[in-house]
Image: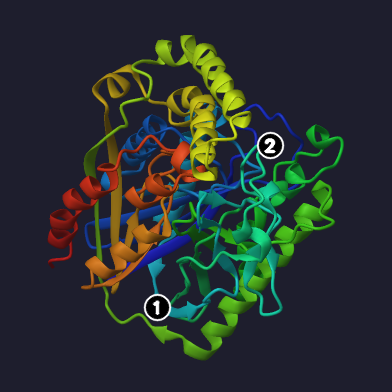
Amino acid sequence: MSLCSFGKFSIKGTFTPVWPYHTDLYCRLAYFKNGEEQALFCAFDSLGTWACDARKFCKELGEACGIPAKSIVFHELQAHAAPYTDNMHEAMDAIIARAAEAVKELQKNAVPYVCEVSEAYFGTDCSFNREQYVEGLGGVTVWTGMGFDENGKPCTQNEGIMLLREYRPHMEVLEKPLYFDNLNDPLAYLFVFKDTEGKVLGTMSRFAAHPDVAVLFELRPVQGKSEMYRYDFDWPGYLSTKLEEDFGGTSIYLNGPCGDLSTKKGYDGIDDFVASDKECQRLGHWFAEKLEKSFAENRRVMKEDFLKTETFTVTVPMREDMPRSVKEAVEDHARLCAESDEKYKAALNDPSLTPAQMKRVIDDWYKSHYNRSMATTICGFDDETLATRKVTIDIPCVRLGDYLFVGVPGESLTELSTWLRSTFTGAKTIPLDQCNGYYSYMATPRSLTLGGYTYWCSWTTRDTIPEMQRQLVPLIRGFLED
């Protein structure tokens, strides 16, 4: 017999705040038990956590509550108005203590359940791929400021929002709108769990897009930005709040791989935090209403009574131009940045360079300025990892009924979701982003070729993602065997 329970706890007060709070910040929990097997989903309103701290959380929480670490999914929504790696490191002991208290209550209160689920096809109504190839230039990324045509298709001619620094190539290809119509993840899910008397215990929803809307003002040409920041759980928080109001119980949102995905968010007139938060509310309620409509029209009972968990560990290569130690990352940073500054200035004054050559100089400028923080504060790599050029990643897998949840690392791209769904067809596969630690952007061979934001925000080589896939195929196939 399968049991479940839902809950949440605040992470407010576990770290030293640098901004005021507009909303509370939570860890939302979904607990499942079937015979000796247990599974625990922990979804944090946080931006990123070092893998070492995520492993500590799973180990120590598991020991405190009698749950194997392999059965705990540490998942972050990557809310941009939320604590980041250094905050989460400071907070981890307090978070574990709060989590243990909350999970013990969930274990005590878990009851038999019936689950109804709907699978929604959102298409491109709610999100789009923010990366595109510009002929003769290379790959560009647009964070914000995207326009939409009369049919709602994302497009722009604005070179100023393509992360080109001061460079404006004024190319013929940009004399008409450039459409951002690459692959996105169109699938959304809503699971509603009820006790045997029909009372809703909790809901679990899943979509894929960046929760970066509460900080929209930071990319607007306005004054006083530093005073505007507030902690905010962004649109996933408003989505979950609305589902709790409409269904009852506790709602947990799980974010899909979204490294290259953006919500169809506003831009014009969003000049302060109040307007940004209002846009979070609009998106969260919009997504909730679409999920609820799908649930009303297409829900079915999840028939299979099954639970199985595992966490697989894979080791993949790191690019050679990363620092060899934390000390080197810090000590060489100023020199490398100065060298890239000089190269960039020289390139700006070199009329012989093609736009594509200039674009690669820009990408490499960004990469050199990003390297220190990626090696240290962002990913928290230790000296052994940097010296060996080998990164160890934990991939949690949970089979719940006829669904397979796979937690992928860092900010993975849509093509990884497509690969997972097409490779493991023995169950309905639901990829989850940013599980068991933050690894920055998980650039694929395609994105490393194109350049752009994913290229310079990544430590991966052309072999990293293919090697991760090679190792995962036999592991997950074996896991799918009953």
Query: In the drawing, does residue 216 fall left or right of residue 410?
Result: right
Circle 2 or circle 1, nearest the eye: 2
Query: In the drawing, does residue 321 fall left or right of residue 332?
Result: left
Kind of residue indicated by mark 2: Glu
The x and y percentages for residue 134 are 53, 56
The residue that mark 1 highlights is 114
Say if residue 230 shows up in the picture: yes
Element type where label 1 sits in the image: strand
Crowd around label 2: few <14 · some 14–19 · many ≥20 (10 Å): few
Element type where label 2 sits in the image: loop
Residue at the limit of the structure toward the front, as seen here: 352
The residue that mark 2 highlights is 166
Query: In the drawing, does residue 129 fall left or right of residue 22?
Result: left
The residue drawn where x is 76% and y is 54% is 277
Task: Please determine whether, in this image, residue 295 is positioned above or below residue 61.
Answer: below
The quadrant the N terminus occupies is bottom left
Q: Which of marks 1 and 2 precedes in the sequence?
A: 1
The x and y percentages for residue 183 are 45, 66
Q: Which of 154 and 40 is in front in this view?
A: 154
Kind of residue indicated by mark 1: Val
